[in-house]
Image (cartoon, rainbow, N blue to C red):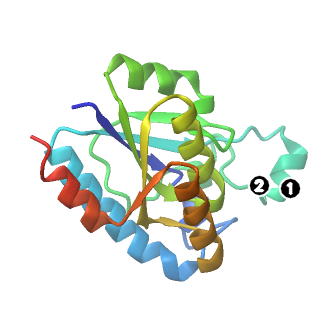
């Protein structure tokens, strides 16, 4: 299968009860439900599921101030949220918005013949957008699932999805994704 699902930053410091830098609370449960359903369906079709998480260095003092010390490497807040369905141990850390800033991710995708990327997770206006644009830059066909992403506000989520669509990223809802995948053997 030449498709990979990238699950971005579904970490305790962004969606947990004690989140240091939370997405909009009303977006969390619907997003998690969509992501977990997508993970179940794609993994049953043999599509690679790749988990990606922020792991910021504690010594990045100034950046960490703006991020409220969220997702610091080795700390509990950087862990993937326990409500997220985990079907494997394929995980790549990053310390920049674009997951493609980790050359090990690119090597993994290329060595597995991946040509298409599906992105879910958070923040739509941050890492989802940066990773989607990075994906296009690396010549992958790229899709973002709009009901499986979250943002700090509904307005930012909508603006980001519209901007991604204008940059050549396919923006679908999960039902459209499942319909598309029903044709994949």
In front of the other: 172 or 4:
172
Considering the image in quadrants, where does the N terminus appear? top left
Which residue has dot 2 on it? 69
Quadrant where the C terminus is found in the figure: top left
For label 1, the residue is 65
**Relative to 139, is 27 above or below?**
below
Residue at coordinates 33% horizontally, 70% vertically from top-left? 33
Q: Which residue shows up at 42% across the image and 69% down it? A: 31
**Disc 1, disc 2: CB below 8 Å?**
yes
Q: Position of residue 169 (x, y in %)?
A: 49, 50
Can residue 5 be seen? yes
Report whether residue 76 is seen.
no
Disc 1 element = helix
Residue nearer the viewer, 83 or 36: 36
Residue 98 vertical placement versus 175 (above, below):
above
| Viewer-nearest residue: 52 or 76 | 52
| Disc 2 secondary structure class | loop
């Amino acid at each position: 299968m030449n498709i990979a699902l990238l699950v971005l930053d579904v970490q305790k410091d962004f969606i947990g009860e004690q989140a240091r830098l939370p997405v909009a609370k009303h977006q969390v449960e619907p997003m998690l439900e969509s992501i977990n359903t997508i993970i179940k369906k794609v993994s049953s079709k043999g599509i690679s599921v790749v988990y990606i998480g922020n792991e910021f260095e504690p010594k990045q003092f100034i950046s960490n101030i703006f991020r409220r010390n969220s997702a610091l490497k080795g700390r509990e807040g950087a862990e993937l949220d326990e409500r997220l369905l985990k079907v494997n141990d394929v995980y790549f850390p990053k310390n920049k918005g674009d997951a493609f800033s980790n050359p090990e991710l690119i090597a993994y995708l290329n060595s597995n013949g991946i040509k298409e990327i599906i992105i879910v997770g958070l923040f739509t206006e941050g890492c989802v957008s940066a990773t989607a644009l990075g994906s296009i830059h690396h010549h992958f066909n790229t899709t973002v699932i709009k009901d499986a992403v979250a943002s700090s506000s509904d307005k930012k989520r909508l603006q980001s999805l519209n901007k991604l669509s204008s940059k050549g990223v396919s923006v679908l809802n999960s039902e459209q994704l499942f319909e598309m995948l029903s044709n994949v053997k």
